[in-house]
Image: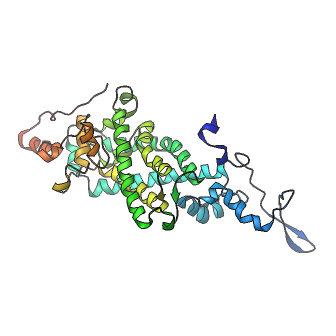
Amino acid sequence: MWDLVFPLQLFPGSLCSTPSPAPLLVEQDGLRLMHLHVSLPSEELPREQDASVKHSDPARAATMDLVLEAADRHLLTPYVYPAGWPEEEPCRQLLSLFVITNLGALTLYLLFGTLSYYFIFDHELQKHPMFLENQVRREIAYALRSLPWISVPTVALFFAEVRGYSKLYDNIEDSPYGWSGVFLSMLSFLFFTDMGIYWIHRGLHHKLFYKRFHKPHHLWKIATPFASHAFHPVDGFMQSLPYHVYPFLFPLHKITYLGLYIFVNVWTISIHDGDYRVPRLLRHVINGSAHHTDHHLYFDYNYGQYFTLWDKIGGSYKSPTSFEGKGPHDYLRRLREKGPEQPNGAVDKTD
């Protein structure tokens, strides 16, 4: 079954080779000699063939993922793994990617979530009657439980990238259109992933999937930046899938991909930060925090990620109530002026 998920070429030789024993130092005639355990093939390859053989390995041909390569060079190879465990060995790569992916996700989430919460998020929103008791702690706890599970299928896709099966490239010279191709690929990535996330997100609101997978994220009606990653694992992975699919379909520079991956995580935090300010000319183009807040409150609108294009095409666009003086901040202002009243039209749809 697994050969349908990972081609056999992903695992050259055995699935997980046993690390070679480390060199042993032995005493002989008062001298310290190094005794090497070396396993030689029955016939030595000619030297002129070495380069071609090396590049036949897809992991080498593609040049290993930048983050994994840096981790191996500066930390994992010298300090963590046994000396004889090759860097390109599949099980080692999977283990490394799992650790790196989880540490990276936690760092992005906690670092930018904390910065956004303390320096951007309006803490007055915590006085809103739809803000839950201990909500921030609950958002963080839910995200921390979900992220390791989201990382499992994510690592499988990263592994395929590392083994050279994506269209990621290292040098600008490898871009089909040079620097222009790099900039075009950035725009293409944003529009492709915005389209993919729109339809996946909208599909998760279908009655067959919503209650089981997506409803936990809608628990946070007045969200904070920490709600950004507080998803059911299936929900979180499905909405991230377009990011991972793109480099298997279209050429993309590796550093550009890394930068875009960080950007989309920060953007996800930003649309939960309660800062509704958008330049007037872009209010009906950019899907910002005001749009996404209305999605949490009114359920059937504003499924997009960065832009409003697909909501307008799909008939699910709603002009944010915050732009019309009817948003959460306006409700709190009226609450202070007139006393308690019911939140304006918010929906808690469970079916």
- Residue 131 in sight in this render: no
Q: Position of residue 248 (x, y in %)?
A: 50, 49
Q: Residue furthest right?
A: 29
- Residue 64 in sight in this render: yes
Q: Residue furthest left?
A: 338
Res. 52 image quadrant:
bottom right
Res. 301 image quadrant:
top left
Q: Position of residue 89 (x, y in %)?
A: 67, 53
Residue at figure coordinates x 16%, y 46% from the top left: 322
Res. 212 image quadrant:
top left
Q: Is residue 152 left or right of residue 234?
A: right
Residue 32 vertical placement versus 308 (above, below): below
Please name whichever residue, 342 or 160, is drawn nearer the observer in this view of the structure. 160
Q: Residue furthest bottom?
A: 30
Colour treatment of the image: rainbow
Residue 27 vertical placement versus 11 (above, below): below
Please name whichever residue, 87 or 185, is drawn nearer the observer in this view of the structure. 185
